[in-house]
Amino acid sequence: MPSEAMLIAVDLGASSGRVLTAQWDGAHFDLAVAHRFANGGVSVGQHLYWDILRIWEAMLTGLRRAVATASIPPSSVGIDSWAVDFALLDAHDELLGNPHHYRDLRTQGMLEWVDARIGKRELFERTGIQFLSINTLYQLAAMRQQESPALQVARHLLMIPDVLNYWLTGERCGEYTNASTTMCFDCRTRTWARDVLERIGISSGLFPPIQQPGAVVGPLLPSIQSAIGAGRSLEVVLPGTHDTASAVAAVPNLDDHSAYLSSGTWSLLGVEIQEPITTDAALAFNLTNEGGVGGKIRLLKNVTGLWLLQRCQEEWARQQLPVDWGTLLEAASYAPALQSLIDPDAAQFVLPDSMPAAICNYCIQTGQPAPDNIGAIVRCCLESLALKYRYVLEGIASVTGRAIDVLRVVGGGSQNAVLCQFTADALQRPVVAGPVEATALGNVLVQAISLGLIPDLASGRAAIAQSVTLDTYTPRREEAEKWEAAYLRFKHFLVSS
């Protein structure tokens, strides 16, 4: 195999999507963004959807630009995205409507509806997944309970990256890391939990065969090859199609004494283990066991992340207020420290009409001063996230019995120096930040392994460490007492919320 190659990563996030090229020179990856586009939910009537056709069109535009700008012909492409959402196809492989967004409110009451048919203990033992209303199982339960016509005529269910791969290649398959997030998947046999599905009235025949990261889906269809101007057909390779799986694959120096935090719209905080942990303690802490690259398990907890501030930014932008991160973080530096705290995962922050108002109302309801300006709201969110990270990290350490000495932060949030420093202070542990483009790097890393350019995951992580700059944030010992007192207050809010 040649030591030099060009790879393409399609990285779809909940608020934006990107198509990137990655040049591999035999030792380093060099990323470049070929195309960036906005993404997000589309509200119609009482429901929230994804515009999957617009995503498809934007992805093709990105592939055309990637091919046109690549210094050498690309060899492969891989797609990753957020988890849990899916598309349904009919018997003619036609799309049955736009996929619902995971924040759509149709799943209200579905945890209880499923619990009445499959108890939580059994469901956690089988799937290893934390109980969140966004889970694929609860979305399907809502469609079943509401007698969805689309579900009644559907013949195939494909997760978001899987349907895009199908349109690129004509081949239908599922991918392990994304399938593992659905709560429809057996965490030990690593196959679809068919009896679980059928007990809530869902046909297991909807679900495709599962492939592991690194599998080749197939070459581009000739029509797609022509549409993007590729001189030769690219191989479509499965990365960890769940974006967090790809991000974790790219965490440099991840070992048994460090945890990872993939920081973006969501915060995914956890450790890498070999086998799922479904003990009573893991269930009580509502941990999740998701599939990782290289056959590993990502034991983690989903925490509402920068969604809090993204929603605030949207509202402030409508009011024509300055919303760039530099301005917001500077404003936060002038606000009182550790004055008002929230539980980022409180129900009122899921999809509020006004995020700033929801934050202020939460503080008033918990007997705290309401943040009275933009800087105070920003500081409240960042400090609260840092404290929630400590709470989750302590829970994971307790469940696993591990001593966790370092937190390794990747993704967009790794650029937020204020949040990283607050997190180091809250944890009283070092925080190592970077790479920012962890998801894309993890995506192309798996492609490189599949093509024989890199021997294994450990070698790939070492190459990534040589390709990026990492920043270390040391806890400020003089701040420890203040953060300890704030943590005690914060835990009280968790119990009472």
Image (cartoon, rainbow, N blue to C red):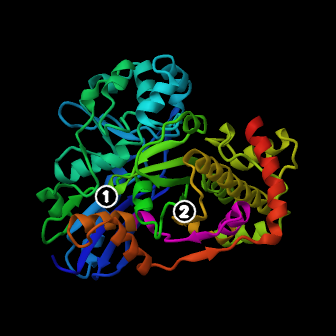
Residue 103's spot in the image, x, y percent? Answer: 53, 40
Residue 318's spot in the image, x, y percent? Answer: 66, 56
Residue 138's spot in the image, x, y percent? Answer: 46, 30
Q: Residue at x 33, y 57 (%)?
A: 294
Residue pushed farthest top? 116
Amino acid type shown at disc 1: Pro
Name the residue nearer the viewer: 23 or 187.
Answer: 187
Name the residue nearer the viewer: 380 or 470.
Answer: 470
Q: Is residue 87 magenta?
A: no
Amino acid type shown at disc 2: Ser
Q: Quadrant of residue 405?
A: bottom right
Q: Secondary structure at mark 2?
A: strand
- Residue assigned mark 1: 239
Name the residue nearer the viewer: 51 or 493.
Answer: 493
Q: Residues within 10 Å of mark 1 (few under 14, many from 20)?
A: many
Q: Is residue 337 visible?
A: no
Q: Residue at x 64, y 69 (%)?
A: 430
- Name the mark nearer the viewer: 1 or 2: 2
Marking on residue 248: none
Q: Quadrant of residue 29?
A: bottom left
Marking on residue 258: 2
Q: Is residue 434 magenta?
A: yes
Q: Is residue 380 visible?
A: yes
The boundaries of the magenta stretch are 419-440
- Of label 1 and label 2, which has the lower sequence position? 1
- Location of the N terminus by quadrant is bottom left
Q: Residues within 10 Å of mark 2 (few under 14, many from 20)?
A: some
Residue 22's spot in the image, x, y percent? Answer: 32, 74
